[in-house]
Amino acid sequence: MPIFQVIVLAIVQGLAELLPVSSSAHVVVAEKLLGLDPSSPPMTLLLVMLHTGTMFAVIVYFWKQWMRTYFSSSDSFKRFAIRAIWASFLTALVGYPLIKVIEKTAFAGVTGGEIESLFGRLDLIAPALAAAGILILVAGLLENRGTDTRGRVYGDNVTMRQAGWIGAVQGLCLPFRGFSRSGATISAGMLTGANKDRAERFSFALAVILTPAAVGKEILRLLKSSHAAAAAGTPIDLHSSMMTSLLGMVFAFLAGLVALKWLSSWLEQGRWYLFGIYCLVASAVVFYLHYGPMHL
């Protein structure tokens, strides 16, 4: 893959990562526009590595907040760890069976069908964007109208109940490109009574926990595909794929750092609902790209 394409995808990922607009959907659409196959093992590995780059940007950006809240004392860390484990357990409990059900339904009678094969389908990304948009819009409007403030608990940590909902909703996001993980989880936290700061902080902490597992899964998938391709006489250049992915990770990290410096202020100005509107508009655009003259 040409370096300029890697840079373009990294910038798209970096700019979209903090915003609850599904950076994955934006990268997949960009890949389509560049004539790439988002569902191929090298491309799904690149996407995960782009997420890894922005994950490190998120760690750098949120580190002081996490140190002040989650790591300020052994008791604070224990409360966070219990909630993070609970949320991650529910992510796996919801996400893994859902992925298996979709694979068995979408690839009935097909040997070796994988959920990643669906990641490039814009007809699936568009409704996922719309669903995320509606969830964000509802959470944002309720926040601005003050109708979700009853029983709201302020502090450094989410409650166990809020952590559970955030983790379960994160599980729903795993099979669907376009169903923004950050948008859905932060909205779930807000709708269950968490203030936006706590929900955002906890959501991105969960992303840091989830990303290494996703990277490992994609590396194993690439190795498996490489062995199958070699047996078929069409080997995949593993070295090139890994180097491209690492390069993309570096550029995504740099782009993420730049974006995080100025985009986060939007989260603090009562404008959460605008991201829901954006997702609905983006959904319409993706529908057009798929069903319109371009037919990506």
Image (cartoon, rainbow, N blue to C red):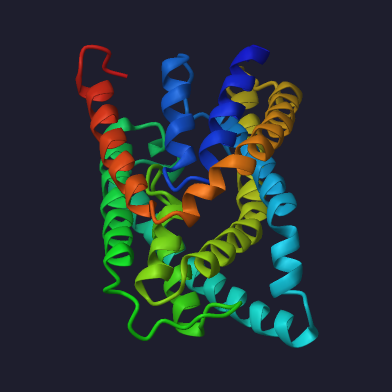
Residue positioned 44% across, 62% down in the render: 185
Residue 207 screen position, x and y as percent = 59, 57
**In the image: residue 243, left or right of residue 188:** right
Q: How many marks?
A: 0
Q: Is residue 71 above or below residue 112?
A: below
Toward which corner of the image does residue 17 lie, by quadrant? Answer: top right
Instruction: For residue 228, say whether it is visible.
Output: no
In the foreground, 54 or 144? 144
Q: Is residue 71 above or below residue 213?
A: below
- Seen at 71% across and 53% down, the residue is 59
Q: In the shown orientation, is residue 160 left or right of residue 254? A: left
Q: Position of residue 106 (x, y in %)?
A: 30, 45
**Could you say which is closer to the camera, residue 217 or residue 31?**
31
Vertical position of residue 72 compared to residue 21: above or below: below
Q: Nearer the viewer, residue 231 or 167?
A: 167
- Please identify the quarter of the rendering in which residue 1 is found: top right
